[in-house]
Amino acid sequence: MSKPTVLRIGGSTTANTGEAAGAGLVARPTTFGADVWRRFRRNRLALVGLAIVVGLIGLAVLAPLVAPYDPLHVSLNEQFAPPSAQHLFGADVYGRDLLSRVIFGARISLLIGFIPSAISMLIGSALGVIAGFYRRWTDTLVMRLADMVLAFPSIILAMVVTYILGASLFTLFIALSVVSWASASRVVRAQALSLRERDFVAAARAVGASDIRIMFRHIITNCLAPILVLFTMSIPAAIMAEAGLSFLGVGAQPPTPSWGLMVNEAQQYIFSAPWASIMPGLAILVTVLGFNFVGDGLRDAIDPYLKGKM
Amino acid sequence: MLRYVMARLAQAIPVIVATTLLTFMLLEVVPGDPIALMMREHIDADVVARVRKEMRLDDPWAVRYVRYMWDALHGDFGTSYKIHRSVSDLLVDAFPKTLALTLAALIFAWGIGIPAGIVGALKHYSAPDYLVTLFSLIGVSVPVFWSGLIFQLIFGWKLGLLPISGYGGIVFLIMPGIVLGWSSAAVISRLMRSSLLEVLGSDFVRTARAKGLTEWAVVFRHALKNSLLPVVTIMAIQVADLLTGAVIVESVFGIPGIGRVSVSAIMNRDVPLLQGSVMLTVVLVVLGNLLADVSYAFLDPRIRYE
């Protein structure tokens, strides 16, 4: 009854390397995933974003093979070498090859984008489902805590955490995990509040499922779509926050090739060696643009009604 | 209305207490004795004990929190460990600069964002609309420290139009204001565009057109007012965003505002100064949210006052 060929995924398009898993959906074009992908790939910007993200992940994984030089190799007689055939992006104040540093920087930005976002989604959805499921004082407690965290500007809170733990990349992981769980917990809580009244929850309870099982097997699984959207959108926010904090000197420490830190190190030479600031900043811009495109596309594809609301 | 404002104000108080308490506790657990930090090499166990007693650092934290807040409400945030000046003096010095910067950013964000959004909605799927979309896509994705440097390079250095950095009068605020306000302008223009498009499709707009009003009157007298409502709500989020962004923009443009104060307090491990500046920022954000909620209720009488 279905026509798998109509919805064939992959095939001739090149941008969708991440869709290997989706190939299994071809036989059943009505699944949620296939439906989302069908809408997602109609969005040209989203596909551009996906290409950027996939390309970045490739660069980050293959950094040692792709980068022309060692990102930490100091070569003082090449200090501020302008962009040339040897150094496509030029060199920085220590004569380090900027292209190699930018490529290795992708690793840091992606790690800082994915891991704290994933941690905060886990914390946020666990707390959110507990709050929405048990309601009463549990709900009040979690939601007031979330309000409190949301009242803090994230950079300021991250700066306070940095102050306590000392400036390092690891601190940033903690700081960024701490600041972004609150919005996830709100979304999941709202969903849990309505899902807990649904028949399938009553059915699960009737066959003797425990609270834990109902929350984490039945309710959470029904919140995965908004969590995924929120996750995709918190990635560029985290990348931006890392860049900002590292730029201020309270994030990654030298000689780490963090894009924000690279701009920090180069900013005082902006007029004599502009490329040293421009290139890493451009990398941030392109990365964040890519993730934003994917996030917007995914949001519209998963639920067109969420447009402008998340 | 007044009851709503009072109720909303009452809601803000626990949030302020909680956030200030959180800041206080977080900074209290910091390893390292403040007295040792203050005196550095001239350290002497007896003196430390005496000063600890004088500063009443051995009291329970709850007592110290209440005392801190009590003093803070009377304008006393303690003395900076490093600069040896009263924290409130330093904050009073820095605050107007951050406020001026934020205001400049707001003026840019609203002055550009709203007209851009209107153009995008009225000419949707045309060249001007794509231009507005491009402007906002870059605006939300560009790191402020980088756009700041690029602006300095182009408008300050190459063209020599504006002062590159420093603080002293309105010309110094143009570049930082644009850089800081760009992402807000982007968000506003996107929201304005989608909101106006939605309102333009509604029944009362069709009625207005049907009774023969000019397009100008339809858009600016009927549709615009209604479409501005969601744009006003976004104000709350933007106060927080702008204050956060100001930390970075101040650093790029050498504006001695609250952001610079907090960063240098972190670098110098200056707890009272950091505490004071963070608390001031947090309270400002909470008040900003409050203001946004109240103005929203004021603009839209349909909102139910709980």
Image: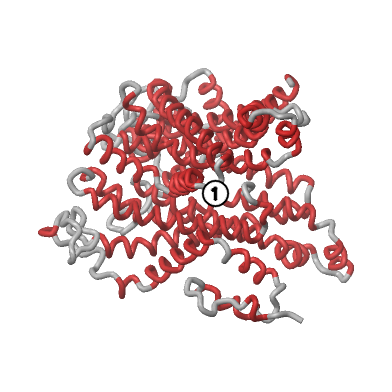
Quadrant (top left/top right/bottom left/bottom right) for the N terminus of chain A:
bottom right
Letter of the chain that mark 1 sits on in the rendering: B
The residue that disc 1 covers is B125
Q: Position of residue B51 (x, y in %)?
A: 39, 28
Instruction: State the residue at coordinates (75%, 55%).
Output: A192
Residue B24 showing in the rendered view = no
Q: In the rendered view, does A216 fall on the left or right side of A83?
A: right
Mark 1 residue type: Tyr
Query: Which colour assignment does the render follow?
Result: secondary structure
**Number of numbered labels in the structure image:** 1
> Is residue B65 placed above or below A62 in the rendered structure?
above
Viewer-closest of A170 and A195:
A195
Q: Residue furthest front?
A: B212
Q: Position of residue A214 (x, y in %)?
A: 78, 64
Q: In the rendered view, does A137 fall on the left or right side of A162?
A: right
> Is residue A101 placed above or below B65 in the rendered structure?
below
Q: Position of residue A133 (x, y in %)?
A: 77, 55
Residue A131 showing in the rendered view = yes
Viewer-closest of A184 and A46:
A46
Instruction: State the residue at coordinates (37%, 37%).
Output: B249
Instruction: State the residue at coordinates (57%, 33%).
Output: B235
Q: Residue furthest right?
A: A206
Viewer-closest of A191 and B28:
A191
Q: Residues within 10 Å of mark 1 (few under 14, many from 20)?
A: few
Instruction: State the residue at coordinates (17%, 56%).
Output: A82
Classify residue B170 by image quadrant: top left
Q: In terms of secondary structure, where does tag 1 sit? A: loop
Classify residue A287 by image quadrant: bottom left
Q: Position of residue A39 (x, y in %)?
A: 62, 64
Q: In the rendered view, does B12 fall on the left or right side of B169?
A: right
